[in-house]
Image (tube, helix red, strand yellow):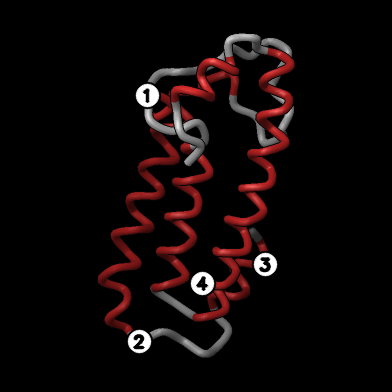
Amino acid sequence: MILFVVLVFLPPFWPSQLSYVGIPLAILGALGFVWSARALGKSMTPYPRPRDTGELVEKGPYRFVRHPIYAAGLLFFLGVGLSSSVPATLGALALGMLWWRKAVVEEEHLVAQFPEYEDYRRRVRRL
């Protein structure tokens, strides 16, 4: 994500009109992140392995998608990228691919720790 900050300042830059799309996306992503993080509470961790003391969260945005923090993060970074430069937009897409892979690994750990996750996974889409 630190590299992303550098990419924002590298040309070529998008036309300023794209900010009309990018800024609302970034705001939506930031709000989605806060909502998702609050729903996770103490279960939140930056690592793909859930906390030993964590619980399976199915409330808030987790009713609609299994990984709303990743979806919100992608919206945020994509919005910032569209408001700034082509390299930043490509960086946001690369970050999205990294998070997609992280979600796959994370789900393996969630299935192992929470037997009810398999049913949740059948009912709720990934992103």
Residue at the spot 57% in from the left edge and 78% down from the top edge = 87
Q: Earlier in the sequence, mark 1 or mark 3?
A: 3
Point 67% across, 38% down: residue: 104
Provide the residue designation for mark 3. 3
* Disc 3 residue type (three-letter): Leu
- Circle nearer the N terminus (2, 3): 3
Mark number displayed over residue 15 = 2
Q: Select label 2 or label 3 by which is in front.
A: 2
Which residue, as the protein is rendered here, is positioned at the far bottom?
A: 12
At which x and y percent is residue 74? 49, 54
Of the numbered discs in the image, which one, if any, rests on residue 103? none
Q: Are marks 2 and 3 in contact (CB under 8 Å)?
A: no
Element type at marker 3? helix
Q: Earlier in the sequence, mark 4 or mark 1?
A: 1
Which type of secondary structure does the marked residue at label 1 adopt? helix
Q: Is residue 19 above or below residue 37?
A: below
Measured in 3D between alpha carbons, the distance from the residue under mark 2 to the one under mark 3, in whole angstroms, is 22 Å
Most foreground residue, 33 or 101: 101
- Name the amino acid type tagged 2: Pro
